[in-house]
Amino acid sequence: MSQGRFRFRDTGPLEWTEDDRWQLQSKCGRFAIRSQKVGDKAEHVLWRRGPDGRFIPRWIGVADTVEGAKQLAEDAKYDPAPSWHGAR
């Protein structure tokens, strides 16, 4: 059994750092934000990354601002909800 199942979940707000590949990446490594321009409109795309980098990132959503993308990450932080029974 993986010891990662026994790690405590972060209950505070996510912290972000700048990244060369992604624009922003959460310090825990679970989320990444990349900004892009579509026509004349800028959008900020939130991705959920795999725990060890082997999984293809999952698209979470798009926001008009970086702060909006960060809020999407806060909302998705407990999806799935924490469980004492391990991963679902």
Image (spheres, helix red, strand yellow):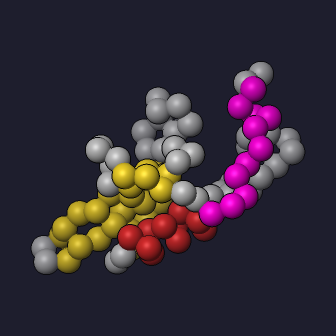
Q: Is residue 11 left or right of residue 22?
A: right
Residue 19 x/y as whole percent: 35, 47
When asked about the image quadrant of residue 39, the answer is bottom left
The main secondary structure of the magenta stretch is loop
- Find the residue positioned furthest to the left: 39
63 w.r.t. 22: above or below: below
Q: Is residue 55 left or right of residue 14?
A: left
Residue 65 x/y as whole percent: 36, 76
Residue drawn at 51 percent across, 44 percent down: 29
Q: Work out whether residue 41 can be spotted.
A: yes
Quadrant in the picture for the C terminus = top right
- The segment highlighted magenta reads 3-13
Residue drawn at 53 percent across, 31 percent down: 52
The answer to whether residue 28 is magenta is: no
The answer to whether residue 7 is magenta is: yes
17 or 25, which lies in front? 17
Residue 56 x/y as whole percent: 42, 39
